[in-house]
Image (cartoon, helix red, strand yellow):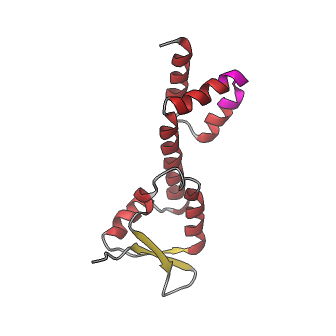
Amino acid sequence: MDNETGKNKTFWFEYLSKSKRVREKYFDSLSRSEQEVLKKSFWDDGWYELVLQNEVDETLDYVKEMYKIDLIDLRIRALKGEVFNISKSIWEHIEQLLLEYGEIYNTDIIFGGLVVCGSDKDDRYYCIKRKRAYV
């Protein structure tokens, strides 16, 4: 392993677990050539997959902290038959947060098998439940 590859690995191991803001601040402090080397290793060495997963995890943690909604748990419970009524504004914010990953990340682990519809009880809420199985 050459010295440059070792530096890249050290950067990714050290900074991957840090928040996006911390990573960006550190990256911005690097010289232009160091940034280019890291960008190349990001794609060539497959670090993008781990960075993407970390960002999705940070977003899920943010939703859990902000709204007290664990989306993975919600999905599991909904697939078992529970029905959830969630404020439209909250659900739309959650969708907005995760929408940016939709093209590059399989969000089925979060939303797969669920349907979102208007609530019968109150038009300020969405009803989150499992999709009906088709026979």
| Residue at x-position 62% and y-position 36% | 22
Residue at the farthest bottom position: 121
Q: Nearer the viewer, residue 131 or 21?
A: 131
In the displayed structure, 2 sits above or below 40; it is above
The C terminus appears in which quarter of the rendering?
A: bottom left
| Residue at x-position 57% and y-position 74% | 88
Residue 15 seen anywhere in this rendered image of the structure: no
Q: Nearer the viewer, residue 41 or 13?
A: 41
Left or right of 130 in this view: 6? right
* Residue 26 point in image, percent of width and height: 65, 30
Q: Which residues are magenta?
A: 27-34
* Residue 65 point in image, percent of width and height: 52, 56
* Residue 75 point in image, percent of width and height: 39, 64
Whether residue 40 is in magenta: the answer is no
* Residue 6 point in image, percent of width and height: 51, 17
The quadrant where residue 132 appears = bottom left
| Residue at x-position 53% and y-position 85% | 122
| Magenta stretch secondary structure, dominant | helix
The quadrant where residue 70 appears = bottom left
| Residue at x-position 49% and y-position 62% | 68
